[in-house]
Image (cartoon, helix red, strand yellow):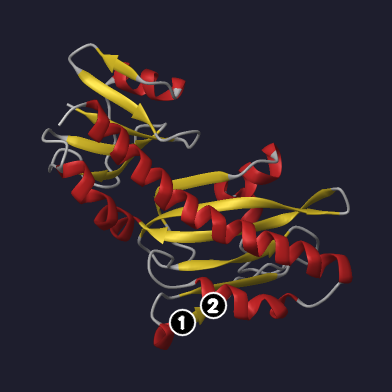
Amino acid sequence: MGQTTTVEAAALATDLAEHAFAIADDLRAQAERLLRTHADLSHLRPAVTAALGGLISGAGVITAERPQRLEWWMGADPAQRTRLDLDLDPASDTFVDVGRQQWFAVPRDTGVRHVTGPYVDYVCAGQYALTFTVPISHDGRFGGIAGADVFVADFERALRPALRALGSPAALVNTHGRVVAGTTAHHLAGSLIRDEQIRAALLTQTPATVPGGVTLTPCGTLPLAVLTW
């Protein structure tokens, strides 16, 4: 099939990710307007729940100020949607410190959008997930995050036909070598690529052929790449 198909597979993965980021960006813009007027975050609820379905398993906003506020919903099926209920009170015994979560901390510390995962999302659904988050700005400073969750199983289901069309073993991985989607039992979602040469090449986020014939095709500027063996 050749390089063109590999590029197309990477482009499809990029499109899937950008769909999630587009939802996060829309919620960010709405949240910033609400924060300027000190309105309740519950006004975001129609937009959040409308974003759910298809690829999107969860979405919402978490603010940075104390006390933190949250409007995050889960469930692609309208009949099974639930609001995420986190204890954000630092004085509570059941306090959940979202500031230590990668999906919150990286946008806060870098000021740029971030893809977290694949990871087991114990906070929300207990499944392998990808979380796409963008920073919210409020009065010229970090105001929180807006984001969207995608189950890895759904992302893989959407991408697998393109990976299989490559005609050789293939996987979508993040820059740390964690597999998002693969075509063989050696590259299951959540497993780790351990070859040090491949891992080093992934960090460069540039097209490469690793000794042994493994090719790496980045997914645009995202921290993801398609590997073929």
x and y percentages locating residue 70 in the rendered image = 67, 70
Q: Which residue is mark 2?
A: 49
Q: Residue furthest front?
A: 4
Q: Is residue 218 left or right of residue 192?
A: right
Most foreground residue, 18 or 2: 2
Location of residue 33 by image quarter = bottom right
Is 187 on the left-hand or right-hand side of 67?
left
The residue at the point 70 percent across, 45 percent down is 108
Viewer-proximal residue among 223 and 219: 219
- Which quadrant of the figure contains the N terminus? top left
Q: Position of residue 191 (x, y in %)?
A: 27, 41
Q: Are marks 2 and 1 in contact (CB under 8 Å)?
A: yes
Look at the image and tell me in which quarter the C terminus lies. Answer: top left
- Which sits earlier in the primary sequence, circle 2 or circle 1? 2
The reply to whether residue 123 is in sight is yes
**Residue at numbered disc 1:** 81
Measure how far apart labels 2 and 1 are at the Cα level: 8 Å
Three-letter code, disc 2: Thr
Q: Amino acid at mark 1?
A: Arg
223 horizontally vs 98: left or right: left
Point 28% across, 58% down: residue: 153
**At 34% across and 28% down in the image, what residue appears?**
217
Q: Position of residue 48 (x, y in %)?
A: 58, 73
Q: Nearer the viewer, mark 2 or mark 1?
A: 2
